[in-house]
Image (cartoon, rainbow, N blue to C red):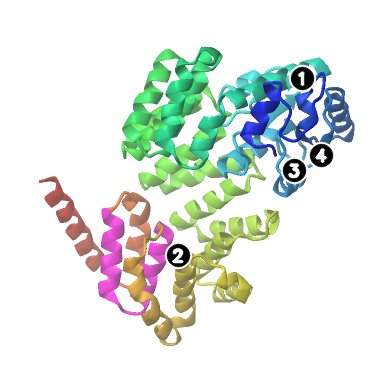
Amino acid sequence: MLEAESLAALFEGKALPGAAKRIPFNPYKELRYLVVDDQAGSRQSLKLCIQSMGGFAVDQADTINAAYHRIRGQMPDVIICDYILGSGRTGQQMLEDLRSTDGLPDTVAFLMVTAERGYEQVISAVELAPDDYIIKPFSPEILRARMDRVIRKKVFFRHFFELRRHGKFDAALVELDALNTAEDGKPYRFDILRARSETLLKAGRWEDALDSYVSIVEIHPFPWALAGQARALQQLTRHEEASDVIDGVLAVAPGYFSAYDLKAEICCDLGSFDEAQHLLQELAKRTPRNWQRKRTLATVAKLNGDLETAQRLIEEVMAHDRIAGVPITDRIELLRTALAGGKQELAQKTLSELTSEERSALAPDEKLTIECLEAVLEGKDAGRKRFDRICADFMRNEMSVDSALDAIRAALLFSDLELADRLAEKLLSGDEAPRAFRAVREMFRSCDMEDHFRQIQRAVAAQRLQRKT
């Protein structure tokens, strides 16, 4: 993949440093392309189109998995992807997977090819849209015109992309202000407004992000702007308002899948795990090979007490989503689900499959979580030594909700009631309290300590009241 400045040089009519002068100069010759289509004939036609423009380095993929492999091997400058990719998967799903996991730099151009005449209505409702789309059939001239428009836009925003990628959000916002006043920024006014709102969200400036999205909605109620408004409200813990806004999005844009994901998140924030699980199960039927969504569904099912569904889903994900091997997070999730369901053999098997090299490469929080789960698996007597060695780290380390729940389970097993109380109070005092409440209550209830749990609840409520006064 070319660096942003090199890309800019090409489309300003300059040769790359060290390259011989070409007259006339053709920037498309310098770019790397990836064509993704499940039909060999269509791939070949696209390749010929690119070659007629002067493009030389054209790679091809017939499936999403093959495309991921090519992208990880060498990032292209331009991806041209068919909307329908077979096996129930779409180019939109591929784009969302790549963008949501930071697997695709903003400088890479992504063009969707489709025979669907109504595709414009599809992308107007999605949060992560392609840079442009082309309706079949089309000529090389149309492809070149679309690519030229997309890449010039990438060049215009290149400094902003670079700043945001490195987490320099304040500087990125200043750059957007400069772009907004630039003469050649007139065609990109809405893009600048959207980029500003998204950057404010990334920067954690929830009130500013909310104001920014509301100002866009007042101009036009774009589904993506309403979803951004709901996301900002969620972060401000205004969950009921966020739920109402996202319900409005789903009413007008039922194909906006990421809005369902956000709705499920909000349900979890409110402790409505039944509704969240139902939403995600229905969505999983429509996107059966979206493995990240099934990971989320597994976690929600576990929080809802549906351990059989949680185990089945995480095993399905581990069996099929193996592009980069089985992530340690999937193994940890299967391990904790097996333990919660009393499936000792499955838990032991999952642990035994971790190699010494994988263990040594674990991040500190992952290492602590696995040690905690291993102590629980070993049992009250055999696991005592391991638990005593790690228990001091539980309060020192920042942990996810799931890891904190693991620690509470271990503390109760090893009769460290003081630690269990402190961990429970910390969880129930934070923003994740609705998400954690049911699981914490069930742990204390399983130890015949429901009255003790109510005492913790009262203590947390008293602390909140004291803070307010």
Q: Is residue 155 above or below residue 426?
A: above
Query: Residue drawn at (73%, 16%), measured in percent from left and top?
Result: 145
Is the residue marked by circle 4 packed among few (<14), some (14-19), or many (20+) residues within 10 Å? some
Q: CA distance from mark 1 to mark 3?
A: 22 Å
Residue at which label 1 appears: 144
- Residue 179 location, x and y as percent? 48, 21
Q: Identify residue type, mark 3.
A: Ala
Q: Is residue 196 magenta?
A: no
Mark 2 and mark 1 lie on one chain; the one further toward the N terminus is 1
Q: CA distance from mark 2 to mark 4?
A: 39 Å
Residue at which label 4 appears: 59
Mark 3 and mark 2 lie on one chain; the one further toward the N terminus is 3
Mark 1 and mark 3 lie on one chain; the one further toward the N terminus is 3
| Nearer to me, 381 or 232 | 232
Q: Identify residue type, mark 2.
A: Asp
Secondary-structure class at tag 4: strand
